[in-house]
Structure formats: structure tokens, C-alpha cells
Image: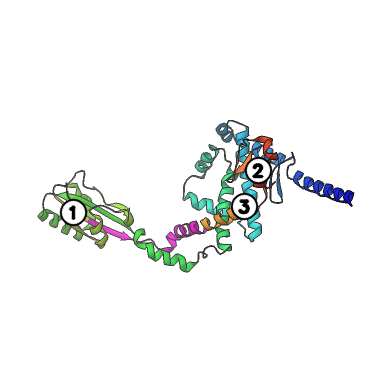
């Protein structure tokens, strides 16, 4: 009986040792759940990025620090892929391309990629970051953490902020006295196109020679209240402390962009709340995954592969093994 117990105990120990060994293979850089990132895959990923001269110059060529940076990206990509499978969500390449184009808002894409390369990231890293942003939004909606962004919600938000979205064409200048202010304002009201000629007669540091366009929400200071109340094609006069004379303010035009024009902006704003909820979903999901990084490369701390302090000694530490999921 005692022999059988010892044999059974030994067998159980061998099974445990074999299971542990499966997650400490020298050919595996990291385990993410049931998936593996092999050493060969990691080396290839590093080499692919360093093939870009701008990336190679930025990071100073191959090295342990850059290898950890790339391994962090690969682990993160696997985590997001696993979370997407778990919750049945997907982001297509076309959606990623459209999101990047929207985020650029007319800016030069090459400038974005050059900036990323200067930090050691490839074009694909930029696209993967965009994919993960979109996945966070999908996960936030799919798990019911926040209500989905629908047409009704967007239109309601538009009505809330339309006053701040309004754009104005306005100008102002300073005249010597109230009588002159009244006369010049009357002339502008009768002929708004005459503003440059009228303003030219009263130059100064507190005068605008031409009508300028600005967002209503950006107007502040002593003129703000009057500007907010003035209909298009009208103006007002007032005195301002430390300004000698009377200020004439003319609001030539008020334009509120239509819903469809600002829809992308509203969607982006709403998406941020969904994305934050999705980030919480990813964090919780990551905590339930068995994540193990080969000590040769470091240890995973707060979603980043960091240089290990204890090296192989950590393998003998039960607490450390439990923390890393080994």
C-alpha cells in the first residue's frame, strides 16, 4: 500500500512537472493563455521592424530593451485577439483603415508613420494600435458596459452641444466716443461688407482689420456676453476697463454646422466612453489569462515586459510563479 502511494505521488509530481515544463520551454518567449509566442516569432518580429532604417536608428539596433518592447506588443496583440474570440467581436482591416484616416483628419499619414518609427514602432504597429482601440469599443458595447452609440443618442448629443459648435465671423475696433461708435455701428449694420474700410479708419492693437472666424465656444472675456446675444448682421458697443474709447463689435455671420458634418466628431466623443469600458473588459480578461514570459526576456508587469530583477531565481519563488501564472 505504501509503495502504491509513493508511486501515485511520484506520478502526480511528474505530471505537474511536465505541465509546468510546457510553460517554460526555451523555444517559447511567452505564453498567452493557450497560445504561444515562439522565440523564432519574436526574433522575426524584431528583424522586421529593424528593416526600417528609421526604426533601427531610433532604437540603436537590436538589443534586449527593444526586444522587450516588441515582445510587449506581441503579448498585447494576443491578449486582444483572445478577448475578441471570447466575446465574439471583430474589427476588419477596412474598419482599421477608415479609423486611421478619420483620426488623421487630413494630416499627412507619412508624418504619423515617421513619428512612430522615431519611437521604434512600425506601420503595422500603428495599425494594430488602431485595431485595439476599435476592439475596446466593440468589447465595451458587446458586454453591455455602456449603451451602444445609436442615431438617437448622437442626435440628442448634437442638440446639447450645437451652441458650442456654432462658428462666427466677427470683428471689433475702438473709436474715440459713444457718438462715433453709434454712427459706425449703424454703417456696418447697413452694409456689412464695408467692415474692412470702416475698421481701417480706427487702427490699433485692440482692433481687427478684417472679420475673423471663430468658434462660439471659444469666445471669452468682456465681449463674450454681447457676442453670444447678437444676431447675425448686428453688433453692439461697450466700454472696457483699461481700453481708452468705446469698443464697436460687429457679428457679421453665425453658422451652425449641420448634424452630418459633425457626426464623426460626435461618434468619436461617444466612442471614448465605450472604449474606456472596453479597456476595463480587457484588463479583467487579461487577469484571467495565464500569462507567462520566459525569464530570459524579463517579466510582465502592468501589461509591459520589464527587465527581470531576479532572473532564474524567480523560478524558485512560489509567489513569483503564482503571479506570472507558471
Residue 291 image position (x, y, % from top left): 66, 48
Image disc number at residue 321: none
Rendering quarter of residue 48: top right
Rendering quarter of residue 61: top right
- Residue 169 or residue 9, whichever sits in front: 9
- Residue 125 or residue 86, whichever sits in front: 86
The structure's colour scheme is rainbow
Residue 103 horizontal side relative to residue 191, left or right = right
Dot 2 corresponds to which residue? 320
First in residue order: circle 3 vs circle 1: 1
Identify which residue is drawn at 50% across, 64% down.
Answer: 149
Q: CA distance from mark 1 to mark 2?
A: 72 Å
Identify which residue is drawn at 23% across, 57% down.
Answer: 192
Identify which residue is drawn at 47% across, 46% down.
Answer: 107
Image disc number at residue 248: 1
Magenta stretch: give its range: 250-274
Measured along the vertical axis of the image, is residue 160 above or below residue 307? below
| Label 2 Cα crowd, 10 Å radius (few <14 / some 14-19 / many 20+) | some
Identify which residue is drawn at 46% across, 49% down.
Answer: 106
Residue 163 image position (x, y, % from top left): 34, 62
Image disc number at residue 287: 3
Q: Please state which of the two labelled residues, at mark 3 or mark 1, is closer to the viewer.
A: 3
First in residue order: circle 1 vs circle 2: 1
Asked whether 261 falls inside the magenta stretch, the response is: yes
Residue 243 horizontal side relative to residue 106, left or right = left
First in residue order: circle 2 vs circle 3: 3
Amino acid at each position: 500500500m505504501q509503495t502504491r502511494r509513493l508511486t501515485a505521488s511520484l506520478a502526480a509530481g511528474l505530471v505537474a512537472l511536465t505541465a509546468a515544463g510546457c510553460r517554460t520551454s526555451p523555444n517559447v518567449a511567452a505564453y498567452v493563455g493557450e497560445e504561444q509566442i515562439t522565440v523564432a516569432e519574436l526574433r522575426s518580429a524584431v528583424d522586421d521592424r529593424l528593416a526600417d532604417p528609421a526604426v533601427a536608428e531610433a532604437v540603436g539596433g537590436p538589443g534586449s530593451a527593444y526586444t522587450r518592447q516588441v515582445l510587449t506588443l506581441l503579448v498585447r496583440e494576443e491578449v486582444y485577439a483572445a478577448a475578441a474570440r471570447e466575446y465574439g467581436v471583430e474589427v476588419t482591416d477596412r474598419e482599421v483603415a477608415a479609423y486611421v484616416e478619420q483620426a488623421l483628419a487630413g494630416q499627412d499619414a507619412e508624418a504619423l508613420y515617421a513619428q512612430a518609427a522615431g519611437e521604434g514602432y512600425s506601420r503595422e504597429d500603428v495599425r494594430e494600435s488602431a485595431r485595439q482601440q476599435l476592439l475596446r469599443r466593440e468589447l465595451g458595447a458587446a458586454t453591455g458596459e455602456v449603451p451602444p452609440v445609436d442615431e438617437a443618442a448622437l442626435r440628442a448629443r448634437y442638440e446639447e452641444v450645437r451652441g458650442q459648435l456654432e462658428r462666427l465671423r466677427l470683428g471689433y475696433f475702438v473709436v474715440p466716443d459713444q457718438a462715433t461708435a453709434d454712427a459706425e455701428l449703424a454703417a456696418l449694420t447697413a452694409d456689412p461688407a464695408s467692415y474692412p474700410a470702416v475698421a481701417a479708419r480706427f487702427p490699433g492693437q485692440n482692433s481687427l482689420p478684417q472679420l475673423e472666424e471663430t468658434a462660439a465656444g471659444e469666445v471669452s472675456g468682456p465681449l463674450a456676453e454681447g457676442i453670444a446675444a447678437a444676431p447675425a448682421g448686428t453688433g453692439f458697443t461697450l466700454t472696457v476697463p483699461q481700453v481708452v474709447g468705446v469698443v464697436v463689435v460687429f457679428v457679421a455671420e453665425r453658422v451652425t454646422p449641420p448634424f452630418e458634418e459633425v457626426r464623426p466628431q460626435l461618434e468619436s466623443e461617444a466612442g471614448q466612453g465605450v472604449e474606456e469600458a472596453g479597456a476595463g473588459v480587457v484588463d479583467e480578461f487579461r487577469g484571467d489569462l495565464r500569462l507567462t514570459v520566459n525569464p530570459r526576456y524579463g517579466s510582465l508587469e502592468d501589461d509591459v515586459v520589464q527587465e527581470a530583477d531576479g532572473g532564474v531565481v524567480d523560478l524558485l519563488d512560489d509567489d513569483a510563479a503564482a503571479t506570472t501564472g507558471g
